[in-house]
Image (tube, rainbow, N blue to C red):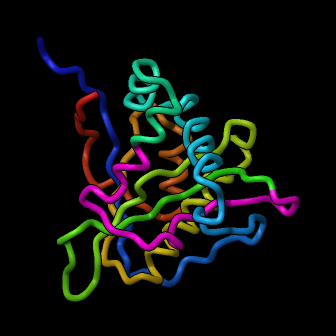
Amino acid sequence: MSQQTYLKVPFVWEGSKPLIEVPSRLEFKPAKTLSHEVLVSAVAQVMESSIDASDQKQVMERGSRQVAEQFLAESKDGFSYQNEWWQIGVTSDNKAVGFVFPVIYQGCAKDGLEEATIYYIGVLPEYRGQGFATDLLLKGTRVLQDVGVWKVLCDTDVNNIPMISTFKRVGYQQYSEPWQRPL
């Protein structure tokens, strides 16, 4: 039986650019300020309504809560990060709109600078279509800039047009044709 695949669009951000300015319409708080239950619930909500084919398949097979729990538990596999890097964006009335989880690839430093990725980014369904993904990606990229990275590599499902647009808006460049990833 052949393995199912889907297409991901790869993006890169080069760290030599000026410091990212993060808009002030959201307040950012470390994800660690949320209870584990609230964080899992937020990730599960994003995953169960995701455009990403891999998220859809996993949620359909195992349920959003179990997928979110495992996803968060595996966040240190091949990556490193400080807990305060993972950010939650909240409105002025303290309602969470989404999250961004920047991480460093282990063993990929170059000339004293790290290589990184956005492990996961998501806007809660009720806040989509308002540009909050841009704010979140800007914040996650700025966190990585402050850490000292030479490159941020990311990808998204070829059908996730809103995220593709967000990467481009923030200054990420598509660096190759879409590639196949296992489902």
Q: Residue at x 28, y 39 (%)?
A: 178
Q: What x and y, as percent, mark residue 19?
A: 52, 83
> Nearest the camera: 127 or 31?
31
Q: Does the magenta stretch include residue 84?
A: yes
Q: Is residue 173 above or below residue 80?
A: above
Quadrant into which the N terminus falls: top left
Q: Give the range drawn in magenta.
A: 71-94
Q: What x and y, as percent, mark residue 47?
A: 52, 35
Q: Which residue is drawn at 35% across and 72% down?
A: 14
Q: In this view, does 89 lie above or below 177?
A: below
Q: Which residue is drawn at 43% across and 80% down?
A: 17
Q: In this view, does 168 lie to the left or right of 10?
A: right
Q: Residue at x 68, y 68 (%)?
A: 28
Q: In this view, does 147 lie to the left or right of 78?
A: right
Name of the residue lying farthest toward the left: 1
Name of the residue lying farthest toward the right: 93
